[in-house]
Structures are given as C-alpha cells and as structure tokens.
Image (cartoon, helix red, strand yellow):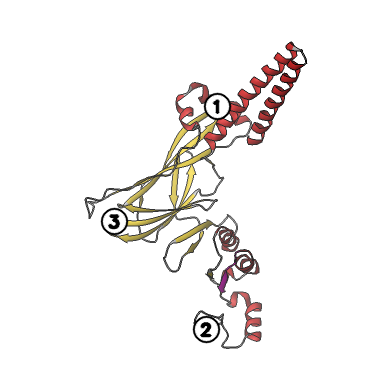
Amino acid sequence: MQGVAVVVTCFALVALLLGWSRWLAGRRLAAAGHVLMAIAAASGALLMWSVLAGLESYEPVPRDQPIAALYLERTGTQAYRATLTRLPAGRVQVFELNGDQWHLEARTLDWQGLAAQLGLGRRYRLERLSTRAARPMSRPEIPASSYGLGGDAGNDLWAKGRTSPAWMRHVRGGHADGPWQPLADGALFTVRLDGKALRGSGGTQLVGAVNAQSGRTLGVEAVADKSNEIPAGQTLLDRLELDGTIALMDALHTQVQTARAIVQEGGGEFVLFVKGNQSGLLHQARHFLPEAFSPSTAAGRSGARTD
C-alpha cells in the first residue's frame, strides 16, 4: 500500500503543476480541471497515509507460526524476570513480574469489503502483559504487574474500526485474550494467535541464546515445521551482536555456515564441539590436531577433548 500511496501523491503533485501551467497559459477551464484532479488525488493519498500510520505498530498474523515466546526466570518469592521475544522479528523485551499467573492481551484488525478483496491480511498488536496472584502475596505492598506493550503510533485504525461506521465498512477492531498461565522458573511458552484467542504452550521447539555471565536470555527463534535447530540457530545468530564475543554451541551446530556467521559476519569467536555425529570431521580432528590442543584462552592454558 505504501507504493500506491507514493504514486497517488506524485500524481497529485503533477496534476497541481499542470493546473498551474495551464493557468499561466490562460487556459482557465483546463487549469480548474487539473486542480480538481489534484484535490481528489491528494485526498486519496491523505487517506492512504493515514491508514499506513495507523498500521505502523501492527504486525501481520503469521500462518501456523508463533507470534511471541516468553521465558521465565524466578528472582524471588512470587517474583520473576520475563523475557518476551517477538517472532519472527526477534525483538526482545524484559519485564519484572510479581504474582503467580500471567496472560497476554492483543488488538486485532480484520479487513472488510474491498480491503479484504485486495488481499490485505489480518494484523495484530500485542497490547498488555499482566499478572495476578493465585494466593496471598508474600509482600502485600507489591502489586501484581501490568505492562503496556502497544504504544499508539499515528492514527490508530483499531479505535476507528470499533467506533466509526464509515471505517467499520473497511476494517474491524477486535480483541484477542490469552488464558492465565502459571509463572514457573525456567518455563518457556510460545504464543500463537488463534481466532480471537492467544494460545500459550510449550509445544513449539525453540532455539535460544543466553548470556553466560548474566543469565539473561538474548533471544529465541522458533524451529520451522519439518526443519531442525541448525537453520533456526543460524537465523538467531544473524540477529545477535557477536562482535567481541565467544559463542558456545553444542555439537549439532558445528557447521561451516554457522562458524562463518559467527566469525566472518559477526566478528566473534566460537567454541564448537566435535562428536561422533560427524564422524568424518572427528576423524580429521584426531588426525591433524595434537592430543593436547584446544582453542587458546585468556590465561593461555590449553587442553583438548574430542568425544
């Protein structure tokens, strides 16, 4: 739609310039016609830019894929640190939660009439992450948590799609609420948008990256259907800031493309294990590398292990 809006805006400017030139040439009737075309095109462009501004904070609903992942770490009694990762973009937000259960709320946009016929797909925006206590809080002075996730951007279509009859012919604003889920240490939930409900479950396989020093989750990536962790891990590496870091990964990720992404593209270093799942590489490592060889360390020590 943005391309169409640009074309219509340019057309309005060209029509206005032609009207001005016709006016200077003394062709008043032709000038009036071009000015009317410019006004009509400008009105259409203004409407399109208004729609685009309202869509800025909304994402298309992916087909058969999660829209977010939530990882929980216990920090105290009825206290948790939640890492919310937007999928597939990988944008990470960290929240401090209090309580025993959590749930998400979202806004949805469903296109109607001509907009639906033009193929505009359903869109959503995560709106709020909340918690509640299922038992008395250990510290009554600390309330349950509630965080706004949306942040209005531009002319929000959602409100117009619920209150304006003119806009409701083109778009309907709706809600999608998730069930209350337990807060648990080490729990990892994936969130899907299913009709008017947000479904949270642990059934989707994910690849995650964790800062070994702080324990913070840096990001997660969902494993695509009929795929495995290797491409998901490579996609996750592309989003991480690797310069000056050391990536430690298990033997499954000992792949040429993975190593290249870490060193050549990311500017980092790696520690990758060689095991029997790659017998040819393991044989070469045992043949060419000294028995006591290992990657150099900050202390200059060495020591090797091949499994």
> Residue shown at 61%/68% (left/top)?
263
Q: Quadrant of the C terminus?
A: bottom right
Under mark 1, the amino acid is His
Where residue 147 sits: x, y (%)?
A: 37, 46
Q: Which residue is mark 2?
A: 300
Residue named by callout 1: 170
* Quarter location, residue 233: bottom right
Q: Which residue is at a point 56% across and 65% down the rendered structure image? A: 243
Closest to the observer: 288 or 197? 288
User: Label 2 vs label 3: CA separation?
Assistant: 44 Å
Residue at the image point whose x is 36% and y is 49% from the top = 102
Q: Nearer the viewer, residue 154 or 102?
A: 154
Element type at mark 1 = loop
Q: Which image quadrant is residue 96 in? A: bottom left
State the mark number for residue 78. 3
In front: label 2 or label 3: 2
Which one is earlier in the sequence, the residue at label 1 or at label 3?
Answer: 3
Q: Quadrant of residue 105?
A: top left
Q: Amino acid at mark 2?
A: Gly
Is 118 on the left-hand or right-hand side of 193?
right
